[in-house]
Image (cartoon, rainbow, N blue to C red):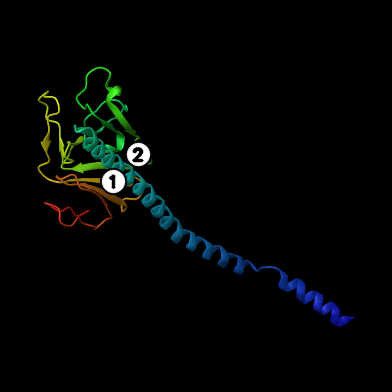
Amino acid sequence: MMGARNRISTWHAAAGFTLIELLVTIAIAAILTAIAVPSYESTIAANRVSTEADGLIGDFQYARSEALKQGANVSVCVSTDGATCSGGSDWSTGHIVTTNPNCVGSCADYVLRVGAAFARGDTARSTPGTAMITFNRMGFAGYVPTTGVWNAFAGLAAPVDLKVLAGTVSSVWRCVAISQLGQLVVLQPGGATVGWPANITC
């Protein structure tokens, strides 16, 4: 009987945690959380920026395809209202694909697709700064000169590097590269185009 009592007493003593054990466990959990949270935030930001860059290049590819199909200029431009080209070089405010970027009046009639503004303070700025990319009937990239001539087109002087940066994690970005010939690619940080008339490094 005495042995049974001793075993019960020993079991009760071993069943709980000491204060030191609890503090050590909490300290380890805090360290693991401090390590994991930045990595998690970086992963989320990278996925979001990749989606935004893919959305941009998808609309550029669509515009180029429509230009080839219609045999006419199709433009992608910065737009804050989803109906007109608003100018400026911040592509994160939204953009449209349009057949008449210099329209006056019912501009929405010429809009083929609308791209939404970015989330979480993400930005997208082009080098050189441009508010519009136009593809002509041969698929070349350029812009519409402000001459008022219907279907006027001027080719790019250099490839465009449109960098999409995460607003929450400064070390996360992607580059949408557009060549004078209308070549399109999304680059990872440190990536570069190959075989372009002038190559771009992200």
- Residue 117: quadrant of the picture: top left
Q: Secondary structure at mark 2?
A: loop
Q: Which residue is mark 1?
A: 164
Observer-nearest of 31 and 116? 116
Q: Is residue 24 above or below residue 175?
A: below
Separation (CA) of disc 2 from disc 1:
10 Å
- Quadrant for the N terminus, please: bottom right
Q: Secondary structure at mark 1?
A: strand
- Residue 35: quadrant of the picture: bottom left
Q: Is residue 134 above or below residue 21?
A: above
Q: Which residue is mark 2?
A: 118
Q: Is residue 5 left or right of residue 111?
A: right
The residue furthest right is 1
Q: Which mark is residue 115?
A: none
Q: Which badge, 2 or 1, comes first in the chain's sequence? A: 2
Q: Hey, what amino acid is under mark 2?
A: Phe
